[in-house]
Image (cartoon, rainbow, N blue to C red):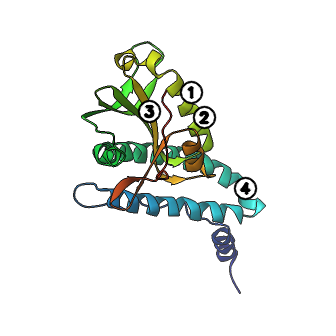
Amino acid sequence: MKSRKEKTKQKEDAGHVSEPGAVYQPQGPLTFEKVWLMFQETDKKFQEYREERQKASQETEKRFRETDKKIKKAFDLFTGQWGRLVESLVEGDLPRVMQERGIMIKRTVERAKSDDDKGHEYDIIAVNGDVCVAVEVKTTLRPEDITHFLNKLKHFRQWMPEYANKNRVLGAVAYIRVDSNSDKMAEKFGLFTIRATGKSAKIVNTENFKPTEF
């Protein structure tokens, strides 16, 4: 016969769901491969939590709501940190991948901001002569990201007057994973699509792709 204390503990254990645990921590300099492993491991933790969350009983609903707030805050931090890592790695590979499409890059600028007080920002700007490529970097690329970035490209010469005299302003999106065929949507609107996975980044547009000039 179990005591009341033992029964109470058993009931609590039955409704317990673990929150996402520690993130994989790499050793040595960061590479695409290490960032990819970190992303996969952490994303797996969040996915496991979501699945357990869906199975929760009504008795644990209140506790889950409180936990959800903490998880959302942690996930926002997670995506923000990965975004910065991916930006740095994509910037390093950008001259090579753009050269493969016949566009030579001499210099790149990370997190370029407009001179006004509106705080408009472009994740990466790559420049060479009369060509300028603005790059939007996302951990997960979604349709709304494409819409938002197209609006930023529409105002690029206005918001970034330093590059207003460039004959060609092109757009590109870089990402680790894609949602709802956003990569195809990006190509449809004339954006280069750069996937960061494994050991490096690569352009995944079709061979006959022609970029839109903004």
Is residue 193 visible in the rendered image? The answer is yes
Q: How many marks?
A: 4
Tell us which disc is closer to us: 3 or 1.
3
Numbered mark located on residue 147 in the image: 2
Residue found farthest to the left: 28
> Could you say whether the residue bearing mark 3 is in a helix, strand or loop?
strand
Tell us which disc is closer to us: 1 or 4.
1
Cα–Cα span, label 4 and label 3: 48 Å
Q: Which residue is mark 1?
A: 151
Kind of residue at disc 1: Asn
Residue found farthest to the bottom: 1
Task: Check the image and report above or below for 211 versus 122.
Answer: below
Label 1–label 2 contact, CB within 8 A? yes
- Sequence-wise first label, 2 or 4: 4
Side of 57 relative to 196 (left or right): right
Q: Nearer the viewer, residue 203 or 118?
A: 203
